[in-house]
Image (cartoon, rainbow, N blue to C red):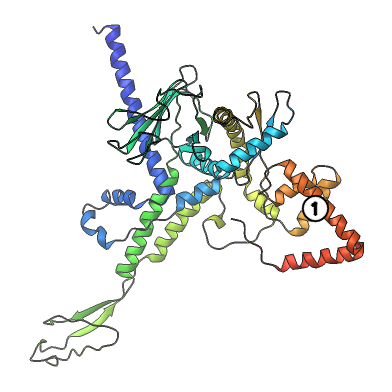
Amino acid sequence: MIRNGQQWNIFYETLEQVRHEAREHLREDAEKAIDFYYGVQKPHMDDYFKNVFANWDDVKEKIPLVVLPITKKIINGLSLLYKKDCVRTIVKPDGNIDEMSTKIYSDIIEEAGKKAIMKTVDRFTRLTKTVLVHPYWDIEEGLKYRILTPDMCDVAQNTQNPQRADIVVYRSTKPDTDPALTGGEHETNDYFVYWDKENAYMIDASGNLVETQINEEKKNPYGILPFAVFRDEQLTGNIFWANIDESFVNVNESVNALATDLLHLARTQGFSQPCIRGEVKGKLQSDPFSFLNLTAGSMGGGEYAASQPDFFFRSPSPKLIELQNIIDKWMATAFYLNNLGQNTMTQQSQLASGFAIIASKLDLLEDRENREELFTMAEKQLFEIEKVIYNYHTSERKIPDDARLKIEWPDINFPISEDEIDKRDARLLKYNLTTPAKLLREMQSDISNEADAEKQVRENKKLNEELQNQFGTGRFEKVQNEFSETQETEPQEEEE
């Protein structure tokens, strides 16, 4: 009979093996999904066709692979959360807005390029389900962000809360000589960075501790784990990493294969095949600008048989249209199941009313609302990390330790006519449902906060009053109308 200790050891070893295999599978899925997103698809398609053709290595040079950016198109179409950046306001413990800290924080994240970073986080969270955002301090540029996907890092889970990490280890690459990290040449470019609440150090691929000039004591100076976790859905159970949705890559892979088949079929059976009936000696070549005389003996010294050879073309009947229809149906199904409209997958666009557009996006808008709650919690976690790191490395303009982040998610504005916009804005202002400053921020996305918008509105009002005094009310209105007509005739840039 096996003792309890032996039973536990066998169980523990088996469990660890299962976890290791699952983690490796997740890592491979993440790498493949990211490759397909960035268009690095040919190596994966090469593996795909090796399982289809026994002699793929012998024929692949004759069959050009077709790869299409379907994964990127779907992911970007689904990622609406940061289509317009959220409004981040710093509040005091009593709930009142801290204008000074809000201005400091806005300047910090603008210099760090957080707007573009968060768009990528939104997309990669869609793609790989879990993303870690690591704020760090660059000696020359200040606060920066590192995005870590499941293929780049590992975590040790918190025993009380499995969705929280106590240790993070991520893989990275550095140049051979990097004085800031090593002080000289090192054996390898690959290294691993270890973080917990107390320690921070690097290990190379051989397991050797990397000596650094910046952090010689190998201590975590911040006292917190500087990684914010962004998830696509709320997890349950004892897992940290969510399983990756393979449907995006599977659709992309299948359409690539069908498109490759279509191109190969068009090249091999899309043209008429020249044929000769009868025995012909020697090698014949033809082109559209020459003729073949196949009369017996006319090609010199009885080169041809005595009988008259027959030269003709045979036209095959490849099922090109049928195969194209299969591809179209595959793509239409993929976009439909992901709540994306038909215009997303075609080059043809159809004009629709604002109401029709909103009706077609209801599922996406509902999904966006669900993600807002998850990302609000993650943004607040990220802010606490940003605050600690920034305050540690700066001596002026610090953010108060008790400051908190308030997040507001702007509505997505679907295209409507100018008349609809004017009527809507007039109605909102009439019933005090908005302010001129908020309307200005909707029109000019480069205005990052309410205070700047209000300042711009005051300046506009002052300038308009001066113009009215200078030209008179009637003349001023005429100038305004002439300017509006000029603006309407100028071509407007289409929003990306």
Q: Which image quadrant is residue 105 in?
A: top right
Answer left or right for 417 relative to 319.
Answer: right
> Which residue is under mark 1?
460
Q: Which image quadrant is residue 494 in?
A: bottom right
Q: How many numbered marks appear?
A: 1
Answer left or right for 383 relative to 149.
Answer: right
Q: Secondary structure at mark 1?
A: helix
Q: Residue at x 41, y 52 (%)?
A: 39
Is residue 53 or residue 475 the one in the foreground? 475
- Count residues near mark 1 (Cα–Cα under 10 Å), then give few for <14, some for 14-19, many for 20+: few
| Amino acid marked by disc 1 | Asn
Answer left or right for 447 relative to 460.
Answer: left
Is residue 115 or residue 285 the one in the foreground? 115
Answer left or right for 59 relative to 84.
Answer: left
- The answer to whether residue 250 shows anywhere in this view is no
Name of the residue lying farthest toward the left: 301
From what the image shows, is residue 439 above or below residue 18? below
